[in-house]
Image (cartoon, helix red, strand yellow):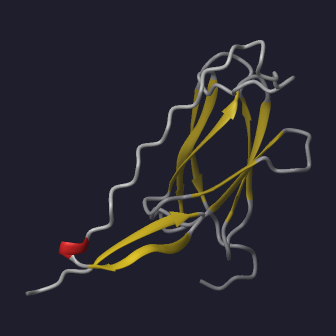
Amino acid sequence: MRRLRWRIVCCTAGLFVPLAAGFSKAQEPPPSAPPSAPALQSTADTPSKAGKQKYSHANDFLIRGTVFNDKAFSFPGVLLRVRVTGEKRFRWESYTNSRGEFAVRVPQGSSYEIVVRAKGFEVQTHTIDARNGGDMENMVFRMQPAEGDKK
């Protein structure tokens, strides 16, 4: 009789951890018991989380666009960092996908600075105003080779 091996893998934060291995088709793991329902508590019994409210993305501002290299081809793997204008610390970071596209969701009501960086190319900075209505900004970046680089 031919035995099949089953392998169940759990992915947590980029780490692959084998949970079970070596079960044959005839020896599948026993089904786990259904989780018991938590007992209902009245709102007077539960401690409230002062100042902790669930954040809703319903009114977010979407910054999206495409990055091209100096030869007008899409540019994958470019680093994009976003911060509130006037702050030193970057709050959001992303990379372009295989087609050179990116999208970053930020809260409305502020002005933002987006910095685009790629090895061997000039750093580009652009300011976005997310205060006056609207919910999205489309951008196009055309990267230029850095001074002194031979290409």
Q: Is residue 10 above or below residue 129?
A: below
* Quadrant showing the C terminus: bottom right
Residue 10 visible to the viewer:
yes
Q: Which quadrant of the figure has residue 107?
A: top right
| Residue drawn at (59%, 52%) of the image | 141
| Left or right of residue 88: residue 95 | left
Residue under the image location 49 percent in, 68 percent down: 71
Foreground residue, 52 or 56?
52
Task: From this view, report whether residue 59 is shown above or below residue 93.
Answer: above
The quadrant holding residue 139 is top right
Where the N terminus falls, by quadrant?
Answer: bottom left
The residue furthest left is 1
Q: Is residue 76 visible?
A: no
**Quick one: 78 or 33, which is closer to the camera?**
33
For image coordinates 26% across by 68% down, the residue present is: 28
Residue 102 x/y as whole percent: 54, 50
Is residue 111 shown above or below 134?
below
Count the marks: how many? 0
Q: Is residue 94 above or below residue 4?
A: above
x then y, percent, for residue 36 = 50, 37
Q: Quick one: 60 or 66, which is closer to the camera?
A: 60
- In x, y percent, where is residue 76? 51, 65
76 to the left or right of 49: left
Residue 104: where, in percent of width, then height? Answer: 61, 43
Tell me: 24 left or right of 141: left
Instruction: Tell me what residue is drawn at x 67 percent, y 19 percent.
Output: 41
